[in-house]
Amino acid sequence: MRNNVAIRLFSAFSLLLYLTGAAQPSASSRQMLLRDEGLSKLNYVDLAHPERNYYISVPAGRDLQLIGQGRVMIGTGKGYEERDIKTGAKVAELTTFDGTIAARRLRNGHTLLVGLNWQEKKGIVLVELDKNQAQQRVINYPDFTYVRLVRETADGNFLLTSNDRVFEGKPDGSIVWQAQLTKQDKAQHAWQAQRLGNGQTLVSGGYSANFQRFDKKGAFVDSISGPPVVNPHFYAGFQILKNGNWVVANWQGHGSDHGASGTQILEYTPAGKLVWSWKQDPKQQSSIQGVLVLDGLDLNHLHVEDAQGRLVPN
């Protein structure tokens, strides 16, 4: 009888751990690429094999993407770098586009560079380069005064974040959709936008310290954040996992002394429940701006977002 009671209590406790996110066997051995803006480093973190971890200095910049051949691409202030995922070694770079804000590899294999008041044009400017780094086209959205990241939609348009706005632009420079983030006390610097399978758009709200969702008409749907114990500060780069959950970098501030601040990698369900988190090592990280969970992904292929917003091989 006592054994049966103990089994039931253990099962109930295990269920409680699962529901609260405290027990996540699949997450306990995760491999992640992290972009630490505070220390300007690229990190590889293998939770099951920490001896494989590295923390390598890289130029300042934004975004990171799996581009195949075991490489990750990071945007820099002059273009981009490609680095070997296993070692962090630089294997290719572009340094002739001073003023680059972010870089993204497109489905066609070309690279899209993002800038502002750039290339002799006003507003947001996108420059598409082919595999030989030859310029193919320039796309201009002149009515915007701020930009962070770009994402290519399934139908070839572009989602861009512009401070307190997010919009979808066509390659001809026209705007087909936009939304206004909910008002905050200071500039939000919204970071990344991703179209979801239900037609809604998910945005990491920067200093809003939350996710915000908008419907097909651009109307605000809801926001997700917290709990306070993780110190929500600035929601930056995120990834939609195969299970539909969202993993986001909870950036804590500029500089090298934020490693003990907040919990900087968070995983939410679309319903807003925090089911897993990872506390950075203050001896190795300061303020994480970008995250890629590598588990289950084939690093030999370029990865882009599908119609559900999830990373898939191209």
Image: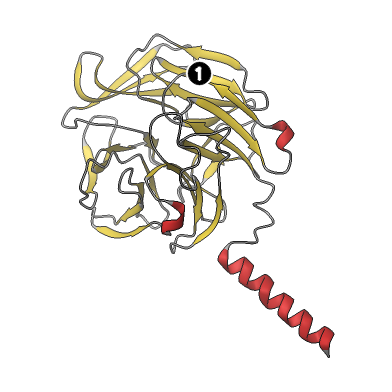
Above or below 12: residue 222: above
Image quadrant in which you'd find residue 130: top left
In the rendered image, residue 117, in percent from the top left (x then y), is placed at 21, 20
Q: Is residue 227 left or right of residue 14?
A: left
Q: Is residue 135 left or right of residue 82?
A: left
Amino acid at pointer 1: Glu
Whether residue 135 can be seen here: yes
Q: Residue at x 23, y 43 (%)?
A: 164
In the rendered image, residue 120, in percent from the top left (x then y), is placed at 21, 13
User: Looking at this view, is 199 or 208 the one in front?
Assistant: 208
Q: Residues within 10 Å of mark 1 (few under 14, many from 20)?
A: many
Q: Residue furthest bottom?
A: 1
Q: Residue at x 29, y 30 (%)?
A: 171
- Tell me the colour scheme of the image: secondary structure
Q: Residue at x 21, y 34 (%)?
A: 174
Identify the residue under disc 1: 81
Quadrant placement of the N terminus: bottom right
Q: Is residue 131 left or right of residue 114?
A: right
User: Looking at this view, is 245 or 195 the one in front?
Assistant: 245
Quadrant placement of the C terminus: top right
User: Looking at this view, is 98 or 308 the one in front?
Assistant: 98
Q: Residue furthest left?
A: 143
In the rendered image, residue 79, in percent from the top left (x then y), is placed at 41, 17
Above or below 291: residue 197: below
Whether residue 110 can be seen here: no
How many numbered marks does the figure carry?
1
In the rendered image, residue 114, in percent from the top left (x then y), is placed at 34, 25
Q: Residue at x 71, y 37 (%)?
A: 50
Above or below 22: residue 249: above
Helix, strand, or loop for circle 1?
strand
User: Looking at this view, is 4 or 110 the one in front?
Assistant: 4
